[in-house]
Amino acid sequence: MNQQKNDRAIGGCQGRPEQVFGVGNRTRDAFCVNSPVIVFFCGLGLSYLIYQKVPKGFVPVEDQGYFITVIQAPEGASLEYTSDVSKQVEAVLQKIPEVDGVFGVTGFSFTGTAPNRGLVFATLKTLSDRKGDIHSAESIVNRARPSGRAWPRRRCRSPSWRGAS
């Protein structure tokens, strides 16, 4: 009696296969061996479907009212050279109508301190002054990028909005 209860609890993979499946040992063994594989592939397929439906970013795109431009001059460049580049970047960013204020820091970056590194912070006007998608922070950063590419031997970039690149 206890053996039959155990057989039902385990799912019929032990005991009398004729009673459970109506077939012999060969089919029972195939089912018991292949069912974890079937479950695995079903789970894998379900994971894929869920991945396609869930948004790709954990944090939605949000306008914080500022952006940061990273400056990296050639290796061995002086702090004075990097400061000049920073002033050029500040001048370009100040011409953007949605930018409220700009300031630069030279000799420091998120990757460490060195005379050839710098950051330029640009604060934007309030959201009430910047209505519409064309005035969003993401759009402003995308418009400012080509200016940074125009300077030879300098790397000026604003991190991509969906995560720093």
Image (tube, rainbow, N blue to C red):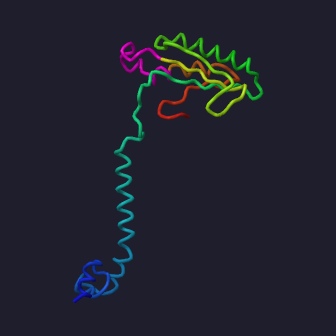
Instruction: In the rendered view, tell whether residue 26 sits above or below residue 109.
Output: below
Give the percent coordinates (x, y) of residue 146: 57, 21
Give the percent coordinates (x, y) of residue 137: 45, 22
Residue at position x 48%, y 20% from top?
Answer: 140
Q: Quadrant of residue 135?
A: top left
Q: Quadrant of residue 65?
A: top left
Q: How many marks?
A: 0
Give the percent coordinates (x, y) of residue 20: 24, 82
Q: Quadrant of the N terminus?
A: bottom left
Residue at position x 73%, y 21% from top?
Answer: 79
Q: Quadrant of the C terminus?
A: top right
Residue at position x 59%, y 11% from top?
Answer: 91
In the drawing, does residue 7 fall left or right of residue 82? left
Task: Decide whether residue 126 is among the magenta residues.
Answer: yes
Give the percent coordinates (x, y) of residue 8: 25, 80
Residue at position x 42%, y 21% from top?
Answer: 136
Instruction: In the rendered view, tell whether residue 95 sits above or below residue 14.
Output: above
Which sits in the foreground, 35 or 81? Answer: 81
In the drawing, does residue 16 fall left or right of residue 81? left
Q: Quadrant of residue 77?
A: top right
- The region drawn magenta spans 124-142
